[in-house]
């Protein structure tokens, strides 16, 4: 709730206290409390008791004592009866009671006894045509009478009933005002803390509210957009990128009585960047049914769009990656199965090797898909142990040189590289993947350099190639599932876009990280880090 709403709530409570206090004084009361009826009580917006000159410790006891006697009703709205001294003694109201002082000590019956005051209890039933509002309990000096009681409580004047009606109207207004302020506070809290952007406009489509989520979505401050035409701020377009005419304005459509729920479009941020949103519009109307305000709820669906694109890419890429080796295996198998064909040993061996290679390719693709599923399900199992990275790098490089003899692979490793804590098989998979990518995406100049360095906390391994490079805008996305640089369907290099995603998951599970530095057409450097088995001992400096 904002400060202004807090102040409004406090002012309304003060107004209610003033109303109760005025009524008590009018009836010549010294202390009193208004007990709100069950019908008028709202636990979310009002209090059950409104005291007058009673502290928090005395209030429960006072209410309990007042409710012991006869209770007023419609026929007898005002009841007056004496209060026994014993009932008021322990309330510590500062009363001088007959036969007792405020501490309950008995006094001598002397000439001062005539000066000791006696008190009585008044109970006033406050109601209107809508029902009861509550009972006003009062303690006042005995024999004091208000202007409504000149004929005694048995012959109450019509003025009392008129005053009760007036008092009920004032109290009901104050209670409803309290409820409205509380409700306004709840709505303001929802408006301010909502994860979805919300803006409201007047009948001329000028912005009058702009919540923090909307500020985060668009980059505009509320103070900068208040009073502006909301179309000028959001600059909406349809999904095809065409400008939305004013006739297609979501708020104008709900003004006209149409329903707008989760309508997808594109809006622009302050810097001009466009993003996909789903908007829902609603309308606040006057008692005559005329539109007064429009409310637009804006939900960013960029992530949903990316997930849809990932699913589409997954189906396309996997279908393509499966189709190619299956077609090759099918073709060679059909050829070898022909009864009218004869092959020499070399031709037969060549075709069988091709079938084996494509089967391995299929096995790797299916394995990566299963691996990605396990990562998503949180089922990545690690066998952590001390690991010598120098030995592991030499093993992987030796294998790669045998597989790709035309590649120039250089290792720049320090004489002593600290041990790390890692799963050997997983880190070998990371290295193998990075080196395979370096070969795959360096078709012209297959020069690869592997370097290593140690810091106080970790060991960093880098793999640098001289290949095609990666555009800056794609460098943050290449570690996502199924993401491939450029159009996956137009690439000649095989792959499903899972390798770097798996590498990142493995390294993050080890407490490490992976990143890339690349310039388009000038090559890339992929680096990853792993925590050291023993942290470096820093020198002690004595001053």
Image (spheres, rainbow, N blue to C red):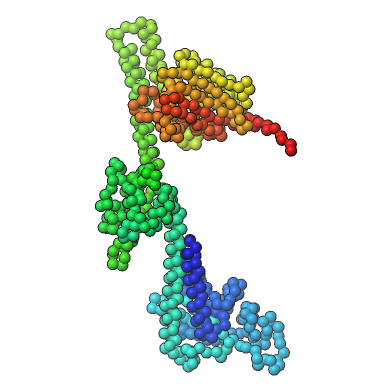
**In this rendering, is residue 47 above or below 200?**
below
Outermost residue, right side: 543
Residue 96's quadrant in the figure? bottom right
Locate residue 432 relative to residue 103 in the image: left or right: left
Residue 542 seen anywhere in this rendered image of the structure: yes
Residue 522's quadrant in the figure? top left
Q: Residue at x 45, y 73 (%)?
A: 174
Q: Residue at x 68, y 82 (%)?
A: 104
- Quadrant containing the C terminus in the rendered view: top right
Q: Nearer the viewer, residue 26 or 7?
A: 7
Q: Residue at x 49, y 20 (%)?
A: 448
Give x and y (percent) for residue 77.
Answer: 46, 84
Residue 429 seen anywhere in this rendered image of the structure: no
Residue 535's quadrant in the figure? top right
Q: Residue at x 31, y 13 (%)?
A: 335
Give x and y (percent) for residue 200.
Answer: 37, 57
Q: How many marks?
A: 0
**In this rendering, is residue 265 above or below 423?**
below
Q: Nearer the viewer, residue 427 or 194?
A: 194
Give x and y (percent) for residue 22.
Answer: 50, 81
Q: Nearer the viewer, residue 464 or 34?
A: 464
**In this rendering, is residue 209 above or below 162?**
above
Give x and y (percent) for residue 67.
Answer: 54, 78
Q: Nearer the viewer, residue 297 or 318?
A: 297
């Amino acid at each position: 709730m904002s400060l202004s709403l807090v102040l409004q709530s406090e002012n309304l409570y003060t107004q209610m206290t003033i109303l109760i206090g005025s009524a008590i004084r009018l009836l010549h009361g010294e202390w009193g409390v208004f007990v709100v009826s069950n019908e008028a009580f709202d636990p979310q917006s009002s209090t059950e008791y409104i005291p007058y000159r009673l502290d928090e410790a005395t209030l429960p006891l006072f209410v309990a004592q007042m409710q012991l006697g006869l209770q007023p009703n419609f026929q007898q709205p005002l009841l007056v009866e004496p209060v026994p001294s014993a009932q008021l003694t322990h309330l510590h109201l500062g009363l001088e009671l007959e036969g007792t002082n405020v501490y309950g000590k008995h006094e001598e019956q002397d000439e001062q006894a005539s000066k000791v005051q006696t008190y009585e209890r008044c109970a006033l039933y406050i109601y209107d045509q809508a029902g009861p509002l509550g009972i006003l309990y009062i303690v006042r000096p005995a024999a004091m009478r208000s202007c409504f009681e000149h004929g005694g409580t048995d012959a109450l004047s019509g003025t009392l009933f008129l005053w009760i009606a007036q008092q009920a109207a004032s109290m009901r207004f104050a209670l409803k005002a309290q409820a409205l302020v509380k409700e306004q506070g709840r709505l303001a809290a929802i408006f301010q803390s909502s994860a979805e952007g919300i803006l409201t406009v007047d009948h001329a489509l000028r912005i009058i509210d702009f919540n923090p989520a909307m500020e985060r979505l668009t980059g505009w401050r509320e103070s900068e957009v208040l009073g502006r035409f909301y179309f000028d701020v959001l600059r909406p377009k349809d999904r095809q990128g065409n400008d939305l005419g004013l006739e297609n304005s979501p708020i104008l459509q709900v003004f006209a009585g149409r329903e707008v729920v989760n309508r997808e479009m594109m809006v622009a941020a302050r810097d001009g960047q466009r993003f996909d949103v789903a908007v829902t519009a609603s309308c606040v109307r006057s008692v005559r049914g005329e539109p007064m305000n429009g409310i637009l709820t804006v939900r960013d669906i960029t992530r949903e769009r990316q997930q849809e694109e990932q699913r589409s890419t997954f189906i396309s890429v996997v279908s393509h990656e499966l189709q190619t080796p299956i077609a090759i295996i099918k073709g060679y198998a059909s050829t070898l199965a022909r009864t009218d064909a004869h092959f020499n040993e070399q031709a037969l061996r060549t075709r069988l090797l091709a079938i084996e290679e494509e089967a391995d390719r299929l096995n790797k693709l299916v394995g990566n898909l299963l691996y990605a599923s396990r990562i998503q399900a949180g089922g990545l199992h690690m066998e952590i142990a001390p690991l010598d990275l120098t030995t592991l790098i030499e093993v992987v490089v030796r294998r790669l040189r045998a597989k790709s003899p035309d590649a120039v692979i250089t290792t720049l490793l320090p004489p002593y590289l600290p041990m790390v804590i890692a799963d050997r098989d997983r880190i070998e998979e990371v290295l193998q993947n990075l080196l395979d990518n370096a070969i795959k995406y360096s078709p012209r100049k297959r020069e690869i350099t592997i370097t290593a360095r140690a810091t106080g906390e970790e060991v960093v391994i880098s793999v640098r190639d001289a290949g095609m490079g990666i555009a800056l805008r794609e460098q943050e996305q290449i570690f996502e599932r199924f993401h491939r640089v450029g159009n996956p369907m137009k690439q000649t290099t095989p792959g499903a876009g899972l390798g770097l995603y798996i590498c990142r998951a493995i390294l993050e599970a080890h407490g490490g990280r992976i990143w890339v530095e690349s310039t388009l057409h000038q090559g890339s450097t992929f680096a990853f880090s792993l925590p050291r088995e023993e942290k470096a001992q820093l020198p002690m400096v004595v001053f």
